[in-house]
Amino acid sequence: MKNNFTWPLINNNISLNDKKLLCEFIMGTDRFTNGPKVVEFEKAWSEWLGVKYSVMVNSGASANYITTSIVRELKGHHGEIIVPPIGWVSDISSVINTGFKPVFVDVDVDSMAISYENIKNAINENTKAIVLVHALGFNGLTDELIKLADQHDLLLIEDCCESHGATHNGTKIGAIGHMSCFSFYFGHHMTTIEGGMISTNDESIHQLARMFRSHGMIRETSQEYQKQFYRDDLNPLFTFAVPGYNMRSSEINAVLGIEQLKRLDFNIQKRIDNLQVWVDNLDSDLYFTDFKMEGSSNYALPLILNKNNSTMPLVCSLLESEGVEFRLGTAGGGNQARQPYLEKFDFKVVGSLANSDYIHDYGLYIGNHPELEVEEIISLCTKLNNIKESKDV
């Protein structure tokens, strides 16, 4: 990946050895569609994450769509799903496009995740599920939130697309909710170029995910599960039990995933170390630094100006002059409730979104790469700390 940045948002994390393995696989196989390598990667991922089942799909966004489709199958075709303003567009569009009303509640700044109190205030008789995004690699779970979902019989969906290896009470996130979504997009903690995963400990969710991934066909499920759909007038090879999609991955993506998984833990630790250096060296009088660090595994380094700091144009100018690529608004461009795609749809906001607006207006992030040196991080922090507020800003 070539660009003009000395500190890009994304580093090329596909190694020369990865490419050689892909070439060897391509020359030595006649099967490229979803097959044994996908199954092998699913098993390896489940073992790494600590769950019973995983289903590989072609993107993290596809994982979002399948999980909300599963909500529809298990909870009915109408209702509300509680969602975060800080996340990715597919966290919301999947809710809309599977027939639910998204209900936005505010986040805590220290985790960028929707908070227990705000979720509690939004639950009513129409609530079917909660989409919890672990934004930028921070753990968004609390024990109280997990209990709340259980008490109200709500499906808890963890979006872990930016947070591989983050933990809650020592357990990897993505292994705690009813189902979870991961992305293996180029530049994330690990990559399959394009790709994603749905993970769960629930057998029914596992079987539904397999069907939704592949057109809704029952042949994708276990023989025991298939029995409930047998019809005398239908070929079981072409019996469609749910209105599914084609979101299958390829063998090539899985081969790369198997290899990248071997160095995932090392890369996660480097990202954790980088975040600690970043937070330790930023001036807390200028920037928000009181993040929920325990259990984090950060995709990016967040930079949120304190509200009394009006130097955002100067910060952006400094980053540009230093060759540091950045994104305004943090995860997904900031507050999703302010995006124009929602104007045509019915959605709800419960309470104030003040924290989400604050992150939207005062926040950005830069790349967090395993290759970063401590000295690089400290040097950039020093320059950021020396920015002087201008009266003209």
Image (cartoon, rainbow, N blue to C red):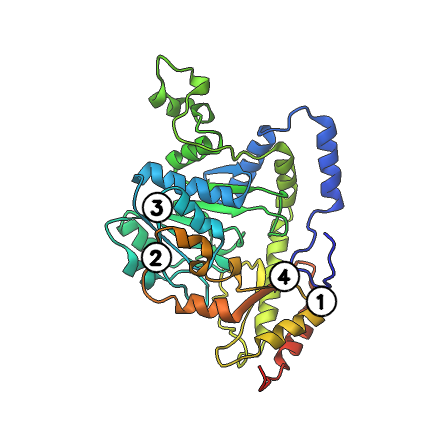
Disc 2 versus disc 3: nearer the observer = 3
Q: Quadrant of residue 239?
A: top left
Q: Nearer the viewer, residue 65 or 130?
A: 65
Residue assigned mark 1: 323
Three-letter residue code for mark 3: Phe
Please report whichever mark, 3 or 1, sits nearer to the chain's N-terminal start: 3
Please report whichever mark, 1 or 4, sits nearer to the chain's N-terminal start: 1
Q: Quadrant of residue 354?
A: bottom left
Please report whichever mark, 4 or 3, sits nearer to the chain's N-terminal start: 3
Residue 329: x, y in percent?
53, 64
Three-letter residue code for mark 4: Gly
Cβ atoms at labels 2 and 3 below 8 Å apart: no
Residue 211: x, y in percent?
44, 30
Q: Residue at the spot x=57%, y=71% of the render?
A: 279
Three-letter residue code for mark 2: Leu
What distance separates the C-alpha of mark 3 from that of mark 1? 43 Å
Residue assigned mark 3: 100
Cβ atoms at labels 3 and 1 below 8 Å apart: no
Cβ atoms at labels 1 and 4 below 8 Å apart: no
Q: Residue at the spot x=38%, y=50% of the render?
A: 345
Residue assigned mark 4: 367
Query: Dot 3: within a 10 Å radius of its alpha carbon, few (fewer than 14), some, or many (20 or more) residues?
Result: many
Disc 4 versus disc 2: nearer the observer = 4
Q: Nearer the viewer, residue 40 or 130?
A: 130
Q: Is residue 165 above or below residue 275?
A: above
